[in-house]
Image: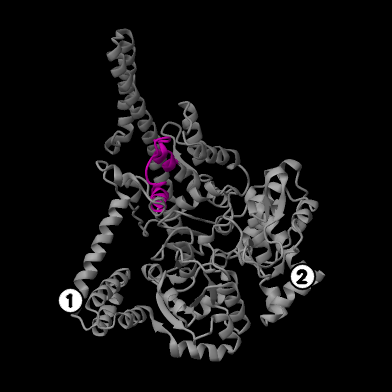
Amino acid sequence: MIDFLTIERIQSAAQIYDVVSDFITLRKRGVNFVGLCPFHEDKTPSFYVSPSKNICKCFACGEGGTPIHFIMKHEQLAYADALKYLAKKYGIEVQETELSDEQKQAQGDREAMFILNGFAQKTFSFNLFHTEEGQNIGLSYFKERNFREDIVKKFQLGYALSERDAFTKEALKSGYKKNYLEKTGLTIVGNNDYLSDRFRGRVIFPVHTLSGKVVAFGGRILKKDEKTAKYVNSPESEIYHKSNELYGIYFARQAMVKQDKCFLVEGYTDVISMHQAGIENVVASSGTALTPGQIRLIHRFTTNVTVLYDGDSAGIKAAVRGIDLLLEAGLNIKIVLLPEGEDPDSFSKKQSASSFHTYINDNETDFVQFKANLLIQDAGNDPVKKAKIVNEIVETIALIPEEIIRLMYVKECAFLLDIDERVLVRNIMKKRQEKSLQKKKTLYPDPEKPEDALTSSSENETNTKLETISAFQKPSAAFPLDPYEKNILYFVIRFGEQYMRYRDDETQEMIYLNVIDFIVSDLTEDELVFNNPLYKRILEEAHENYTKEGFVAEEYFRNHPDPDISRIAVDISTDSYMLSPIHAKPEKVDLDDETVEEQKRNAQNKMLLEKVPYEMFNYKNAILNLREKKIHEELRSADERKDFERQIELLRDLQELHESHVAIGRQLGERIVVRI
């Protein structure tokens, strides 16, 4: 475990801008910074970074937190590992105490799988350089590809020995568990406990996350065998989803930001060869069609993508496939077809960085123009094919989100196709309307049409996003009192350690009430506890700690090791959090009577004296509403059963509730809320 003083040093050193900008391109906006959110499909920047508060927050999906919690969420790390990550970044030495057996057991599957992948990478790299088989087969192959040793080490390339279970035996011997070997896909488990290395006899290409952790492997066999696949990849797992990873992104991210461009290629060796030639802003889709997750990765660092493909007919066809998603994401796409017989791997080996960029600048073509020219060549003078060209071009342009860019393409394509611009514009508008209608149908299915309730995987992603956005905006069925409880938490987190002061009418003494103590005492007096267990835990921790020297509730909960608690604190800390309408009323400041600081303190004290009790009464009123609804439901049930005695009991309870409502109504005055 990491001691408390070291944690404090890490929290003090970690600056939110420094941490987030390692992963996202941030642009100045007022006193804050803004960029594309890494946690959802974000086409317009909604992820804000506040250096003054040292927090980040997405105003679309709600994710955010301190530097520690950003790293936890982004890199899927446990709290302790996120602390180590930041300690390494800021050069802080971490001394840990030995973990107990229970603590070791509590470490999650994800962490264990990442650790195992790290061990596997080191083993494969060792095999490559320090075993006879690795040197003769693996290292010889890389030398034949003219890869320098420093490049081989940079990408952590390796070799898996050809013995059936050589790696598996080494991993088990080193204490790694068989179930994690199977989960990561490093070991194939067959009948009768048959164990086999997935990558045996192959050169290894590790796949890295944005922070450099090994998430998966690709293995290429060097022997010619028709029955054996040339490439084998890690299977999908709890830590690896192929659709969300791009080969080389860890090594490319800084260059992508610096040059504001990303080169997109197909394979591992294309990326490695281009790095060796001095071109580092390059990633590979690993031979598969681009996915929305991969596009989001690119979009976080740049909006300019140049796709490099072979100059043969297959390369030309590949250039057209999968580009529509890039356009739809708002990226600027260029196409470069390399000389015939060349691929990015072979071509970059013949170039310096300077000559490579010169060739790109001279030969890159706008994608829409490229596609139009390609289709025109195929169509010749066939009128039917020409009609299909118009439809394909319309479909492509309709995907582009920016209207001005669409209009520019319309002019260009109208000239190339020798067609009236208005024809293209009408068809593009029609396509966009159809798409908009389909999107609405997806988000808001017609309950009268059963088929609308059936959603695809992409629709499920959209629905999940909507649920995330609304999670803090409406009460759930499980916790209908959430909005009221959260309004109380606002004062616990923002003002919990502070005092409300007022003068007793009878004794004329100044009375000081701590905000947290007042809230807990008021709830205890009426034997009330929060329904939401997370809110209940926050309130309990606040009450346990508020008397401790130096306790500041907002700082304590924003830096809480539980990311769910931290997220709530950050949400409450941001300006977007809105309480009841009365909280938006500004306090007037009279600078003639008092100093600015005194006026601020008095204004805050007045606000607390008015609004903390108000929220407590509002909460109790909501509880009474729920109880009243329940009694009415029981009354209907008792009436159906002809249970007159029970009806009389319930009517008495209803009368008591009504009297309580009246009492609370007097306290709330005109501000009494509508019953839920």
Q: Point out the residue furthest to the front here.
A: 226
Q: CA distance from mark 2 to mark 1?
A: 64 Å
- Give the image location of residue 469, x and y in percent: 40, 51
Picture layout, residue 541 above or below residue 272: above
Q: Residue at x 47, y 62 (%)?
A: 293
Observer able to see residue 149: yes
Q: Quadrant of residue 13?
A: bottom right
Q: Amino acid at mark 2?
A: Gly
> Circle 1 sits in a helix, a strand or a loop, which is it?
helix
In this image, 669 relative to 147: left or right? Answer: left
Picture layout, residue 143 above or below residue 155: below
Mark 2 nearby-residue class (10 Å; few <14, some 14–19, many ≥20): many
The residue under label 1 is: 422
In this image, 662 relative to 616: left or right? Answer: left
Label 1 near label 2: C-beta < 8 Å?
no
Q: Residue at x 74, y 68 (%)?
A: 125
Q: Main secondary structure of the magenta part?
A: helix
* Magenta-tinted stretch: 461-488
- Colour convention: one colour
Q: Residue at x 75, y 42 (%)?
A: 101
The residue under label 2 is: 134
Of the image marks 2 and 1, the number of the one nearer the N terminus:
2
Q: Residue at x 50, y 46 (%)?
A: 493
- Give the image location of residue 292, x and y in percent: 44, 63
- Give the image location of residue 302, x and y in percent: 46, 74
Observer able to see residue 306: no
